[in-house]
Amino acid sequence: MVSPSPFPPASAFSVARQSVAEQVLEELRHRVVLGEITPLMALTESKCAASLGVSRVPVREALFQLERDGLVALGKRNTLVARKLGETDWQEITAIRLQLEAFAAGLAASARVSADLIQLRQNVHAFASADSPEALARLDAEFHELLCAASHSQWLSAAWQTIRWPFEAMLVKNFRSYVSATCLAESKASAADHAHIVDALEMQNSAAAIQLLQQHITRWQEWTPHS
């Protein structure tokens, strides 16, 4: 039995205001993060280009970026494949986040920029209203991205971006697993954690923000995605 292809006909893919290269990158990234392109599946320029109805050039650029994102890697015969992420990756990313995001929380609390707090609170509200595990994963990753951006440290944000997309890809697995084991409403417990972190940032309480952030990350550590 032939498994269904993750690539829909070219007619299902439309180019909007973004450049073709940006659209191709976002579409392929989206499919890898959601597991529509399964781990170790080959990503050839010709197949992707034909599926999306574009030339090979924007596909080639997108694949290079996905490799930098940590979502694809060089497989057998020098072919790029979707990276297989598992327990070791989750543990290493968690260890990095405990240090990096704690540093970000301290800097964000000291800076206390109103615009940053507004964005973080909007994210918390959106997370509480999310209607799928995939939306929860996207908004959870976005919250932590916004937190790092609120540090106003160019180098810290750049460092966090090196794990950003593998983190979301594994969050998708986590939330799907958690929702399956409990329910969607219970899976939104992170909203309260995030809200408390933002409260601490608003009060410029660096110590509390760091502690809450680390407790939040550690609490989720047990929900490890399995390959």
Image: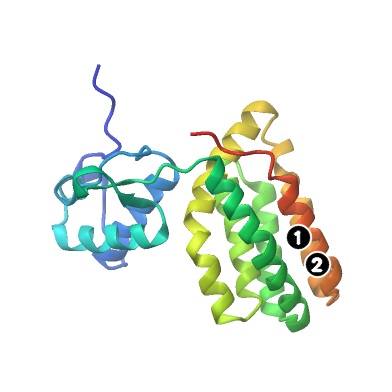
> 13 or 72: nearer the eye?
72
Q: Is residue 132 visible?
A: no
Residue count near mark 1 (Cα–Cα under 10 Å), binned few <14, some 14–19, many ≥20: many
Taking the spot 21% from the left edge, 40% from the top edge, the residue there is 9
Give left or right: position of 203 versus 219. right
What residue sits right under mark 2 in the picture?
Answer: 209
Q: Where does the image place residue 225, in percent across and percent down from the top left?
A: 56, 38
Residue 161's place in the image compared with 107, above or below, is above
Q: CA distance from mark 1 to mark 2?
A: 6 Å
Marks counted in the figure total 2
Report which quarter residue 133 is drawn in: top right
Residue 29's place in the image compared with 153, above or below, is above
Residue 3's place in the image compared with 74, above or below, is above
Kindly identify the amino acid type of the residue bearing the numbered disc 1.
Leu
Kindly identify the amino acid type of the residue bearing the numbered disc 2.
Ala
What residue sits right under mark 1 in the picture?
Answer: 213
Taking the spot 36% from the left edge, 37% from the top edge, the residue there is 38
Say which mark, if any, is on residue 45. none
Query: The residue tagged with tag 2: helix, strand or loop?
Result: helix
Residue count near mark 2 (Cα–Cα under 10 Å), binned few <14, some 14–19, many ≥20: many
Q: Where does the image place residue 56, in percent across and percent down from the top left?
A: 15, 57
Residue 93's place in the image compared with 120, above or below, is above
Give left or right: position of 76 versus 208. left
Look at the numbered discs 1 and 2 and tell me whether their residues touch, using CB distance below 8 Å: yes
Q: Where does the image place residue 21, in percent across and percent down from the top left?
A: 26, 64
Query: The residue tagged with tag 1: helix, strand or loop?
Result: helix
